[in-house]
Amino acid sequence: MDPAIELKNRMNISRATPLFYKVFAMVAAGMILDGADVYLASAVNSAIIANHFATIAQGSMFLSAGFLGLFFGSLWAGLIGDYFGRRQAYQINLVLFGFFTVLAAFAPNVWALIVLRFIAAIGLGAEIVTGFALINEFAPVATRGRWSASVSVIANMAAPLTLVLAAVVIPRYSWRSTFIIIGIAALILWIIRHNFPESPRWLISKGRYQEAEAIIQKL
């Protein structure tokens, strides 16, 4: 039998093992950070307009820069993930998101903030796409839809967390502190995910059967 077919068949009947739960937890953590950042943008926008750091028009550009970055990040993630691997794309996008989010906290003016927000959002968009791809490629076939739905539910848990963060942090420490909190949390997760396994399905697609075999044995 073709080794690629054999390995894929073994993955199709795999169970939720400790390795899969580890992958799920790290993907879910990234999704919470992503969701928090997206929801937090509205609160930050209100704050920068209220303290005259930005005009209403500039605030709209700040929000638009985030969504534009999400768009390009989604496109970029697919290209990088298919060529260099899911793991590489997953690590690059998170450090991009975390690093430029921290830099955004020190933006000297609204134009710098808009540019930094755009770059950070590229990493944000890539994180979302790659996260769902990894869950689908690691999850047992029989329960793949359930695990994908669970990631979506967890990502939306960021909404109430963001409301609390915005209500407590922004009035006391300014909007800049929220970027520091989210950015540092992303960089910490990036360090934790240093040993994140490569997708066996991607390895199989590249003919790297021995590496895929080593991971599949743990699934």
Image (cartoon, rainbow, N blue to C red):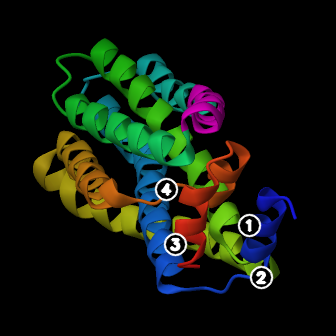
Which type of secondary structure does the marked residue at label 1 adopt? helix
Using the image, determine if residue 87 lies above or below residue 53: below
Answer with left or right where residue 43 lies relative to residue 64. left
Question: In this rendering, which labeled residue sits more in front, label 2 or label 1?
Answer: 1
180, above or below 58, in the image: below
Identify the residue position indicated by label 1 in the image.
Answer: 7
Q: Dominant secondary structure of the magenta stretch?
A: helix
Q: Residue furthest right?
A: 1
Provide the residue designation for mark 4.
35
**Residue 122 seen by the camera:** yes
Q: Amino acid at mark 3?
A: Phe
Q: Quadrant of residue 75?
A: top right
How far apart in space, not on screen, are marks 2 and 1 (Cα)? 10 Å
Q: Earlier in the sequence, mark 2 or mark 1?
A: 1
Amino acid type, label 2: Ile
In the image, farthest residue toward the left: 173
Spatial CA span between label 2 and label 3: 18 Å
Q: Image quadrant for the N terminus?
A: bottom right
Vertical side of 213 occupied by 208: above or below: above
Q: Picture coordinates of residue 125 (x, y %)?
A: 55, 39
Q: Are marks 2 and 1 in contact (CB under 8 Å)?
A: no
Residue 13 numbered tag: 2
**In contact (CB < 8 Å): disc 3 and disc 4:** no
Residue located beneath label 3 in the image: 24
- In this view, the residue in front, 196 or 7, is 7
Mark toward the start of the polypeptide (1 vs 3): 1
78 is within the stretch colored magenta? yes
Mark 1 and mark 3: Cα distance apart in space:
21 Å
Location of residue 49 with respect to 23 vertically, above or below:
above
Residue drawn at 38 percent across, 68 percent down: 161
